[in-house]
Image: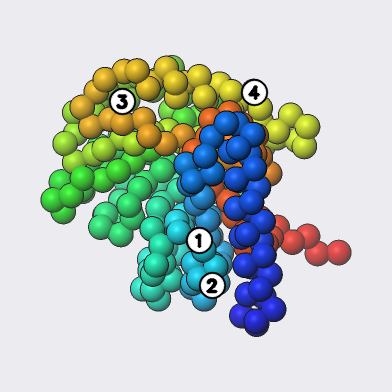
Amino acid sequence: MTEQEKIELRDRIQSVQERIARAAEQAGRKPEDIILVAASKMNNAERVQAAISAGIRVCGENRVQELLEKYEQNAYQGADLQFIGTLQTNKVKYLIGKVSLIQSVGSVHLGEAIAKEAAKHGVCQDILLEVNIGREAAKSGLPPEELDEAIARLSEKKSLHIRGLMAIPPIADEFTKNLGYFNEMQQVFVDNLTKKYDNVDMDYLSMGMTNDFETAIACGANMVRIGTAIFGARPYQIVSP
Ligand SMILES: *Cc1c(COP(=O)(O)O)cnc(C)c1O
């Protein structure tokens, strides 16, 4: 990375932090209560380290293979590492002991696989349950109406700690910005706050990405996952002329 690229990265991070702070204040909340997760996919170890030097405290990866490669290169040193992507049960074993939080647990089956692997390592794994709030057939996650039963079943696992909910709403256009889905998620989250289960604490509502994180914060998100606004467009997002 050139010095100029590092300066630009630092500026983008600062700008994102300021926008988060403003959105939090507008929603009557404290900026420090919102956790910024830098979605670092397709950014190499050097760029991830530069982001951490510029103030990033949490990194989120969405592919196991990429995470392992960068982990070996000490990319995440100085930050907390989380997993935010689609996860196959046979890959769970690579994450235990490396990630503090698995955000994308979209089925009881996956939750059980994580519980089993965590127990094997003698640890308790923090997870979020992923809710398929748009009820999209092609997307993973629990439909809202199946959430209750999933929580009840996974709360029995001593090696799991459910810390909240995560959602990736359908791709929105500029104007609707997923407000309806975010509102629905907030309702689902609040409904679950009052329920008492072992091993369940509804601490985090993870929603909001580059295009809609301010809307998500207005709707109660306290964890946002941001890639493009921090690192710039990923290679495949750049449309060649
Ligand atoms: C890439 C990614 C993000 C961030 O997306 P941007 O639009 O680049 O901010 C958030 N969440 C998940 C699960 C991702 O894979």
Amino acid marked by disc 2: Ala
**Residue shown at the point (33%, 41%) measured from the top left:** 127
Please rate how many residues cluster around mark 4, counting C-alpha atoms within 10 Å: few if below 14, some from 14 to 19, many from 20. Answer: some
Work out whether mark 2 precedes mark 3 in sequence or the reverse, and give the earlier one.
2
In the image, what residue type sits under mark 4?
Answer: Gly
- CA separation, marks 1 and 2? 9 Å
In the rendered image, which quarter contains the N terminus? bottom right
Residue 2 vertical position relative to residue 163 in the rendered view, above or below: below
Q: How far separated are the C-alphas under marks 4 and 1?
A: 30 Å
Contact between labelled residues 1 and 4, with CB atoms less than 8 Å apart = no
Q: Position of residue 237 (x, y in %)?
A: 70, 58
Residue 102 located left or right of residue 55:
left
Residues at marks 3 and 1, CA–CA distance in whole angstroms: 31 Å
In 3D space, how far apart are the residues under numbered discs 4 and 3 (Cα atoms)? 24 Å
Residue under label 2: 50
Residue 151's disc number: 3
Q: Secondary structure at mark 4?
A: helix
* 163 relative to 191, above or below: below
Q: Quadrant of residue 5?
A: bottom right
The residue lying furthest to the right in this view is: 241
Residue, disc 4: 180
Pointer 1 residue: 56
Dot 2: what SS?
helix
Report helix, strand or loop for mark 1: loop
Query: Which image quadrant: the C terminus?
Result: bottom right
Q: Decide which of tag 3 and tag 1 comes sooner along the chain.
A: 1
- Furthest toward the bottom, the residue is 2
Tell me the kind of residue under disc 1: Ile
